[in-house]
Image: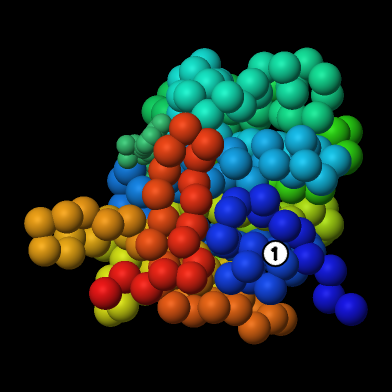
Amino acid sequence: MLERVPTGIAGLDEMLEGGIPRGRTVIIVGGPGTGKTIMCTQFLVNGIMMYGENGIFVSLEESRSHLYQAMERFSWDLDRLEKAGNFRFVDASPLCRAAGDVKIGKYAVGRREFSILGLMNTIEQIAELTDAKRIAVDPLAMIIFQYKDMHERRNAYVDMIDSLTATGATCMTTMEVPSTGPGTVVEEEYLAHGVIALQNLQIGKAMTRVMQIRKMRATAADFQPRPYKIDNSGIVVYADETIF
Ligand SMILES: Nc1ncnc2c1ncn2[C@@H]1O[C@H](COP(=O)(O)OP(=O)(O)O)[C@@H](O)[C@H]1O
Ligand SMILES: [Mg+2]
């Protein structure tokens, strides 16, 4: 029996026949402001509060204070969850800045040694220490785009998926793309076990948020585009509605 990891996001689990297949790595693709960071955090917070699964947020962009502050809007108290030992924030954003040696938590990572493998090594250690069942890596762009060569870039993401898979955790990674229309597919979508696309669609005068599961290995899923909203409870998907 394929075990499911419910996201706890209203509507989405229905679309996924109960949740993401356990141990898989999904990529969330979408333009800026579509809710990728919110979705990752909601997945982790629900994991802790609803399903007793610890989580790690690996941030390549937002600082701890910015993320924690932004997520207070949804009444997600990351600071409290962290103090209780259920949540860990891994600030990997210094890796993406220009110079000097950097630290991730107590682990020193020299800039020149920086590689996906270095980062993953750290994540694997922290995952074990935290007994994490869910991991989010948000957003991938910074690490992936350091590779100019498409072959290297593919390898880098494959390494990351392998490494995330080795932790046994169910994982969300994100990728910012200018458009997620049917014609635009980023390379990483071929490699991830599942793809969820978020989009702001202009329909007439109104802007509608649309979520589409584009791929989910090992399971059937609802591949129709469905409207979603972001409100004070986070993301809510209208799994029974169509967009037209
Ligand atoms: N309480 C809220 N109600 C409605 N929309 C919100 C709320 N808080 C944030 N948003 C929306 O969430 C989006 C930002 O989400 P975020 O996850 O940071 O996006 P991304 O990571 O994809 O760039 C913005 O479009 C913002 O308008
Ligand atoms: Mg973001």
Q: Could you say whether the residue bearing mark 1 is in a helix, strand or loop?
A: loop
| Residue 54, placed above or below residue 215 | above
Using the image as rendered, state which of residue 79 and residue 211 is in the foreground: 211
Q: Does residue 164 appear to the left or right of 3 in the view shown?
A: left
Looking at the image, which is closer to me, 10 or 91? 10
Is 32 left, or right, of 87 in this rendering?
A: left
Residue drawn at x 64%, y 83% as measured from the top left: 220
In this picture, residue 158 sits left or right of residue 207:
right
The residue identified by callout 1 is: 19
Near-viewer residue (29 or 125): 29
Please indicate, yes or no, whether residue 140 appears anywhere in the rendered image: no
Q: Is residue 39 left or right of residue 31?
A: right
Q: Can the viewer see residue 9?
A: yes
How would you rate the neighbour count of disc 1 (Cα within 10 Å): few for under 14, some for 14-19, many for 20 or more? some
Q: Residue furthest left?
A: 205
Q: Residue at x 46, y 61 (%)?
A: 238
The image quarter containing residue 108 is top right
Query: In the image, what residue occupies the spot 74% across and 30% down?
Result: 87
Image quarter where the C terminus lies is: bottom left
Location of residue 135 with respect to 201 vertically, above or below: above
Q: Quadrant of residue 136?
A: top right
* Percent x, y of residue 49: 76, 36
x then y, percent, for residue 6: 72, 57
Q: Quadrant of the N terminus?
A: bottom right
**Looking at the picture, which amino acid does disc 1 mark?**
Gly
Colour scheme: rainbow
In this view, 79 is above or below 139: above
Residue 221: x, y in percent? 60, 79
Question: Does the residue tagged 1 have its C-beta within 8 Å of any atom of ligand 1?
Answer: no
Spot occupied by residue 68 in the image (x, y as percentages of width and height): 55, 21
Q: Is residue 171 above or below residue 37?
A: below
